[in-house]
Image: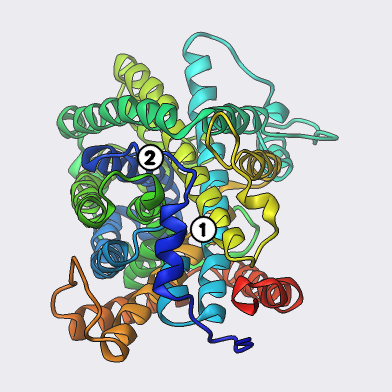
Amino acid sequence: MNNSIWRRKPMEAFEADMQKSELKRVLGKWSLTAIGIGAIIGGGVFVLTGTAAHFHAGPALAISFIIAGLGCIFAALCYAEFAAMLPVEGSAYAYAYGTVGEIFAWIIGWGLILEYAMGAMTVAVSWSGYFTKLLKLFHIDIPYYLRNDPVSAKEYAMANGLAAPEWAVNLPALVSVWFVTWILVKGIKEAASANNLIVILKVAVILFVIIVGVFYVNVQNWTPFIPEQTMIMHDSGVEQPAYGWGGIISGASAIFFAYIGFDAVSTQAGEAINPKKDMPFAIIASLLICTILYIAVSLVLTGMMNYKDIVGDALKAPVAYAFDAAGQPWAVFVITAAATAGLLSVMLVMMLGQTRVFLGMAKDGLLPKFFSEIHPTFKTPWKSTILVGAIVSIVSGLTPISLLGDMTSFGTLFAFTMVCLAVWLLRFKDPERARPFKAPIINLVAPLGIVVNSFLIYNLGDEAKKFAIYWLIFGLVVYFIYGKPNSKLNK
């Protein structure tokens, strides 16, 4: 019995898992790419452009996207090498388990749980913002205490001279999560088909925003392009520095969660038709396409609407509110309807990735068997999907969006840093291993990925970093109490 926390899962064990997997292999190259785009386009464009511009970078948000994109490119190349070498569900968790060791894999897996769960929660809250705005276009107004978490509802009441509500819940966010959960339980093929249609719609609308929005850009909103650094109050009630180059870097950290789409692609290896070839293509293609679109949209948004005016409900639906401010209600309807549909696909991919990480960890004995039980008809991990849906729905109904976004960014950046480190280490430890895809100039790409992503972690909000550290400590406790004794490598 190998009782070391650095024990590695043999390659033969991964191959055996792939042979006896009950998941359906139905995803081709473009379906995988669409899953990546489905996750990437949504959170960044429809959600965090507003919060990152107002609380962090101002008009220089475009620079934040470039910096975040650079960190992603380094990580994406490392992910692509691992995904081709170990085409199994579990993403970075599985890669680390087969190359670096169990404790390293557990920490990454625990970080991925934080990443995907918080990502789904953030998008659910933003979906609520766009859905509420869509209903308003039809003159339907949901009471503020049924469309806001308790903190946001109290702030809304104070700002509008209303009595503070006795209770509040973001009901649209909560219901949307259960709708996505139902789709995911039904099956991966159905989920992928729904995602493909929504991705086509989202890309069309993003191009619409860029092309039409250019005509309503007021260049005065870009002046100064990099605002002078100052202190600003966040939703959490904590005052933090914003703008200047420090704000650009913290903005890059805050929006980083928007790039986790290519990461989500790597969790679908167990359902890919030709994972060794198609996974690297989908990871890199989805990242490059979306980075270009992000930069363009951020420039248009901050040109159409002054970053200081992105407050209140505009923080939840900034792109739609920018066209509203420009006096284009027809465009507002198009964008709001598309965003309402589009954010569902982001939520779908986040929760899909979450359950596949659970599946990989449970198969290895590090989590209870409950998380690996496959439905006999739908061939999906239905029990863990329902559990994830329950947790995500409750938290998204009760938590402000800004804290959720920062928490997701921590989980993402942490996983990216660990993957870059693991790929680099493996090149030295096992240089002869077959690599269908090799990240170029690994001695430059991997260190840059580690440095950039670690630096962005450092620049996240203090509250997010504090909560994330508590989460990782709790994860280590769970590992030593349950994971390590029950690991299949113990047997």
- Between the C-alphas of marks 2 and 1, the distance is 16 Å
* Most foreground residue, 192 or 443: 192
Residue at image location 62% in from the left, 67% down from the top = 463
Say above or below: 271 vs 111: above
The circle on residue 69 is: none
Say above or below: 243 vs 106: above
Say above or below: 321 vs 372: above
Q: What amino acid type should be assigned to the residue bearing mark 1?
A: Glu
Q: How dense is the environment of label 2, judged by Cα within 10 Å: few (below 14), some, or many (20 and up)?
A: many
* Most foreground residue, 50 or 243: 50
Residue at image location 19% in from the left, 50% down from the top = 285
The residue lying furthest to the right in this view is 166
Q: Is residue 177 visible?
A: yes
Q: Is residue 118 visible?
A: no
Sequence-wise, the earlier of marks 2 and 1 is 2
Look at mark 1 in the image and give the residue it sits on. 115
Residue 217 at x, y percent in the picture? 20, 36
Q: Quadrant of residue 335?
A: top left
Q: Secondary structure at mark 1?
A: helix
Residue at image location 57% in from the left, 47% down from the top = 401
Query: Which mark lies nearer to you, 2 or 1?
Result: 1
Colour setup of the view: rainbow
Query: Where does the N terminus fall, quadrant-wise?
Result: bottom right
Q: What amino acid type should be assigned to the residue bearing mark 2?
A: Gly
Q: Secondary structure at mark 2?
A: helix
Q: Is residue 207 left or right of residue 137?
A: left
Q: Quadrant of residue 37?
A: top left
Q: Is residue 473 left or right of residue 320?
A: right
Look at mark 2 in the image and give the residue it sits on. 42
